Amino acid sequence: RNENEDFLRGERYNHVDRIATAVDDYVQRSRNMGGPSSGKKGSATGDDVVGWGCPRVRISMAELRSENPRLAQRLRFDPLRHLRALEAACHAVATEERPGYDKDDVRIKVAIHGPVSATPSSPRDLA
């Protein structure tokens, strides 16, 4: 297990429950999008779930900073690489908690919220 998985599996912020809830919500949304005769994209029959988008987990920068300041700093200086690593760690947790959620190549995404640094920044400032 790497540093990202250790952060996600920590009991302090219940990230494992958040990931499981995001996957469950995605599956439920996908099933509610229409039946087989509706012709809608995202139709689901039985266990076949194809939805729009992907499951998304929100991670607070304040939580990340308080739990692992080094990891938060690296995310700030190289966001794309470390976001992908967080997403891979979330995917590992999700496949363990909800086996089979990724059978249609569905990958969980991570959304970061909260202040990234002491000064206000936009996504363009992170590049």
Image (tube, grey):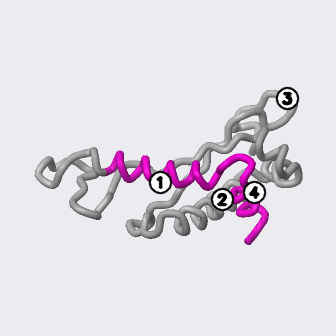
- Could you tell me which residue is drawn at 65 percent across and 63 percent down? 89
Q: CA distance from mark 3 to mark 4?
A: 25 Å
For residue 23, the mark is 1
Q: Earlier in the sequence, mark 4 or mark 2?
A: 4
Tell me the element at label 1: helix
Marks 1/4: CA distance?
Answer: 19 Å
Disc on the earlier residue, 3 or 4 = 4
Which type of secondary structure does the marked residue at label 4 adopt? helix
Q: Secondary structure at mark 3?
A: loop
Task: Give the crowd class for mark 4: few <14, some 14-19, many >=20 residues within 10 Å.
Answer: many
> How far across and down, in percent of the image, does residue 40 sit?
21, 47
- Give the total of numbered labels: 4
Q: In the rendered image, which quarter contains the C terminus?
A: top right
At a point 53% along the width and 56% down the height, the residue shown is 108
- Find disc 4 in the rendering and name its residue: 7
User: Which range of residues does the magenta coloring cover?
Assistant: 1-30
Q: Nearer the viewer, mark 3 or mark 4?
A: 4
In the picture, the disc for residue 119 is 3
Residue placed most toward the observer, 94 or 52: 94
The disc, 1 or 4, on the residue closer to the chain's N-terminal end is 4
Label 1 neighbourhood size at 10 Å, few (<14), some (14-19), many (20+)? many
**Side (left or right) of 31 relative to 125:** left
Mark 3 or 1: the one toward you: 1
Q: Residue 36 location in percent, x, y?
A: 15, 55
Tell whether label 4 touches label 1 (CB within 8 Å): no
